[in-house]
Amino acid sequence: MKMVNSDQIKQLDNIAMESFCIPGIVLMENAGICVFEEVLKYIEQKENKEVIVVCGLGNNGGDGFVVARHLFNKGIPVKVFITGNPSAISGDAKKNYDIIQKLNIDIQILVGVNNLKKFSEVVKGCGLIVDAIFGTGLKRDVDGFIQEIISIINKSEKGIISIDIPSGVGASDGKVYGLAVKADKTVVLALPKIGNINYPGADYAGELIIKDIGIPKAAIKNMDLNMNLITNDMVKGILPFRKRDTHKGNFGKAYVVAGSTGMTGAAILTCEAALRSGVGLLKIPVPQSLNTIMETRLTEAITVPLPEFKKGVVGISDFEKILKTMEESNVIAIGPGSGNSRELEELLRNILEHTSKPIVLDADALNSLANRKEFLKLIQSQTVMTPHVGEMSRLTELDIDYIKNNRIEVASEFSKKWNVVIVLKGARTVVAGPNGEIYINKTGNPGMSTPGSGDVLTGIITGFIAQGIEPIKAAVAAVYVHGKAGDLAAERIGEYGLLASDIIKELPITIKHIVEKIKINA
Ligand SMILES: NC(=O)C1=CN([C@@H]2O[C@H](COP(=O)(O)OP(=O)(O)OC[C@H]3O[C@@H](n4cnc5c(N)ncnc54)[C@H](O)[C@@H]3O)[C@@H](O)[C@H]2O)[C@@H](O)CC1
Ligand SMILES: Nc1ncnc2c1ncn2[C@@H]1O[C@H](COP(=O)(O)OP(=O)(O)O)[C@@H](O)[C@H]1O
Ligand SMILES: [K+]
């Protein structure tokens, strides 16, 4: 599903109005009706049916007037509060304001401290608050008076439904501009805004309900939008159909260069995740002294024991043997638990120089690249890199906080600069491709902030690429599946004790449900 920032949604509204002749007031009516329907659903189950609609002076407020009119027409008690002088209301919002005035709906203007006291009292008696103060037009920090209004709303302990985006959250970045409404539900109009998905704003949205307000699909297509929210349908479309008449050669061969003394677990998690993602054959080079443990733990993988030039690590001295297996594989993953060593750096350089096969670079492979930035220019376009913000900081020498606050831009710029697919991990993982395409993932939970969780993701990406999926699509599908499996694990056992191996256990059923399009209750 396409995602937009505030300029893009404005442009899209304009295309709908100018190129498709849909009057703005029709879009506003549709928007208001969508929210009205959600309000009805909410108050149906409540005893106190009084609704307060708090409206700003822009079009978000205009949507609020439409909601108030429909509630009034249905005989539901409704009061409208306006957060400033109504003489500033214009355009379609003004038309809707005029209508509710003519209907004699209870409208109160919020200016001055005394008014706030009264607002507080009315809030105490209502059943639900509709937040229509700011939508995608929020430009600067919310001023003090409106912050007080938001604070009363947030402290009310009433149900809160926000229109389009919680007021105070920036639509283009998800930042909180001073103070924001903490909603139970947000009815998102037309397409999700970045601020509905990105943290910290996403924490304010509650349940997201995305509603079609009648903007034609052709208008969305015309816009050539580059930002996407990863959905179940998108992933279902990526995962290949499994024919009946097959053998394991049909599902690819993966080669995983991972693990070292003290970190065999990382290699095991990566390999198991790749196997549970459907790969046909998996080989792993293993320092001789670690072969027994790998063979014992990895029943289905093939280990390739190597003489140890440096005890317990795979490095440059093993390159000739590694090259041979690499040539038979469809994809190579490098880095989980490999350890930081000069041997690994040189091995990585040789692998990058000698193959045009898809490569997944994670963990210590990323650290090697951070140490030896001159190797970055050896990277070929089929490469996927999976940094978390710490690794991204080492690779780019950008401040961690800067990366956290600019995840999309940082991932996209790095991807374009080095012609690689970047998977910038974390809550709301960003997948960025060299042509400027961006995919944001909403699945996953804090239970996945656990050791080895990233190794599992590397295994899934590797398993999918082995099965013939183009690297960027494999990354998109993998981050969604990984998060969804984590959500299923959290649903079963909770977030506290969730281990990376629990994510792997849920992979088969997660993929089954996506492919068969069964809604997973997690
Ligand atoms: N045709 C359209 O453009 C449609 C717009 N729709 C609604 O319109 C919204 C966007 O409307 P607008 O662009 O009018 O913007 P908003 O209604 O979000 O707010 C803009 C108003 O708030 C003021 N403002 C911005 N930041 C402020 C701050 N920090 N403190 C005080 N005042 C501030 C602006 O000067 C302007 O008057 C969407 O979110 C959606 O709810 C829908 O009605 C569908 C159709
Ligand atoms: N709060 C969260 N919400 C969603 N996903 C998360 C969350 N915390 C962690 N994850 C996911 O878990 C994985 C953690 O990977 P990483 O930081 O590399 O851990 P490790 O190095 O221990 O394997 C990433 O894919 C990340 O997106
Ligand atoms: K709002």
Image (tube, rainbow, N blue to C red):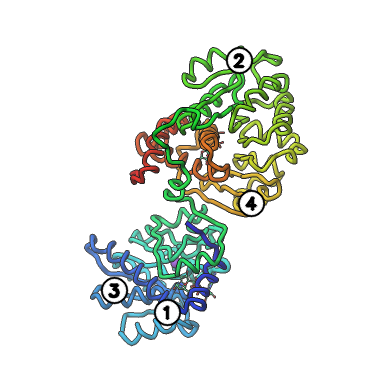
Q: What residue is pinned by disc 1?
A: 25
Disc 3 versus disc 4: nearer the observer: 4
Disc 1 on helix, strand or loop?
helix
Quick check: marks 2 and 3 in contact, CB under 8 Å? no
As shown in the figure, which amino acid type bears the numbered disc 4? Answer: Ser
Dot 2 or dot 3, earlier in sequence: 3
Q: Who is closer to the viewer here, 125 or 398? A: 398
Structural crowding at the residue carrying mark 3, measured as other residues with C-alpha within 10 Å and reported as few (<14), some (14–19) or many (≥20):
many
Nearest to viewer (mark 1 / mark 3): 1
Residue type, numbered disc 1: Ile
The answer to whether the residues at label 3 and label 4 have Cβ atoms under 8 Å apart is no
Residues under numbered marks 1 and 4 in contact, where contact means CB atoms less than 8 Å apart = no
Judged by depth in the image, the label closer to the viewer, 1 or 2, is 2
| Disc 2 CB within 8 Å of nearest ligand 2 atom | no
Instruction: Give the residue type that dot 3 points to.
Output: Leu
Q: Say whether mark 3 is within 8 Å of ligand 3.
A: no
Which quadrant, please, contains the C terminus?
Answer: top left
Q: CA distance from mark 2 to mark 4?
A: 39 Å
Whether label 1 touches label 2, CB < 8 Å: no
Instruction: Tell me the element at label 2.
Output: strand
- Residue at image position (51%, 78%) is 18
Give 314 or 76, whichever is nearer the viewer.
314
Q: Earlier in the sequence, mark 1 or mark 3?
A: 1
**To which residue does mark 4 refer?**
412
Query: Dot 2 corresponds to which residue?
Result: 305
Is 465 placed above or below 49 here? above
Neighbor class of circle 4 (other Cα within 10 Å; few <14, some 14-19, many 20+) is: many
Does 36 sit left or right of 453 as displayed? Answer: left
